[in-house]
Amino acid sequence: MITRRALLHGIAGTAGLLGWPPGHASGEQPPETTRIKLIEISGICIAPQYVAKDLLHSEGFTDVQYFQAAAGIATAKALAAGSADISLNFVAPLIIQMAAGDPIVLLAGVHVGCFVLFGTERVRALRDLKGKTVSIQALGSSQHVFLATMLAYVGLDANKDVAWVTNPSPESMRLLAEGKVDAFLGFPPDPQELRAKKIGHVVVDSGSDRPWSQYFCCMVGANRDFVRKHPIATKRALRGILKAANLCALEPQSAARRIADRGYNYDYALATLKDIPYDKWREYDAEDTVRFYSLRLHEIGMIKSAPQKILTQGTDWRFLNELKKELKG
């Protein structure tokens, strides 16, 4: 197992090789606060958030905390409440809570390709889900919101055309293997485990199937008051997360060991880091992503706000634009 000292040495070496500026860059002010609070979910698609811990220390945060929350609406609400300062999350639940008036601001996109829909032989395409049973973690979860937008895109009504059942992921995978549910939408490490165990077959892969593959799934959101009060800390925290995203792509074995230290299967973690393009955060358009999902959510009645209102009131790309220049591609 890689030691923390070895990982930090590797991080420093990689940062120097890529020309990344150190956390305490010459002339850069220290963060206004040395404490930063992030989210931990029961999934590893937000791997950069875990790998970033040591990088955040190098950015001047001496107290790096992780708040437990479910992915989706629960994570968005935790950000709004100030239980966390900054976090990766599927963008659509963040938009839903922003449209409801919660003080959340989107700062950057990180990666595409979280979600994979698996089905039985009865499901070969999204439209085949009409009249079928779909297992998800919870209503309001990232899985539920994402699949609802997917269904609307092919003309199905998530409230009428499918039967939702809620189960923990291990139970959902067992039910899919036994044919007791027709489909299951998973995010890492679930797709990696399903493939390894040859359970079901892939119906839609958001990492390769359009239009989903053209937009970020996970973006960085933050508590609006935190950003307003601590702009230097916000930029430093975002820099740590984006550096970590690059490291997930450049040093997947080391990153997977760090993720495994949190209790996840190393092989599935490594497969995740190889499946998801973590180093492409500068190549997709964060604004287009927000517009795309805002339109989808508006169409299905999950939000009433127009996309432009979400973009105007709920996004702040200034830190991302600065970091694109600082962190050489």
Image (tube, grey):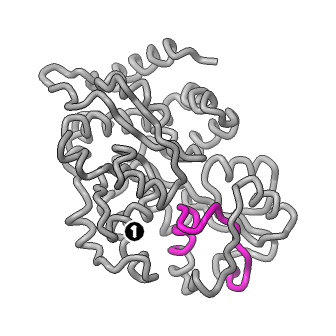
Quadrant of residue 301 within the rendered picture: bottom left
In the figure, residue 186 lies in which quadrant?
bottom right
Name the residue: 35% across, 26% down: 18
Q: Farthest left residue?
A: 27
Q: Give me the residue at 58% from left, 63% from top.
A: 143
Query: Which x, y percent locates residue 287?
Result: 29, 61
Picture coordinates of residue 211, whole percent (x, y)? 48, 69
In depth, the one of 197 and 173 nearer the eye is 173
Quarter occupied by residue 232: top left
Residue 314, image x, y percentages: 26, 61
Q: Is residue 231 part of the magenta span, yes or no?
A: no
Quick one: label 1, few (<14), some, or many (20+) residues within 10 Å?
A: many
Instruction: Please indicate whether residue 193 sits to the left or right of residue 96 in the image.
Output: right
Q: Looking at the image, which residue is at 23% across and 21% down?
A: 24
Question: Mark 1 = which residue?
Answer: 96
Q: Is residue 163 above or below residue 287?
A: below
Classify mark 1: helix, strand or loop. Answer: helix
Q: Position of residue 116 (x, y in %)?
A: 63, 60
Q: Hey, what amino acid is under mark 1? A: Ile
Q: Quadrant of the N terminus?
A: top right
| Region rendered in magenta | 128-149
- Inspect this view and state whether residue 228 appears: yes
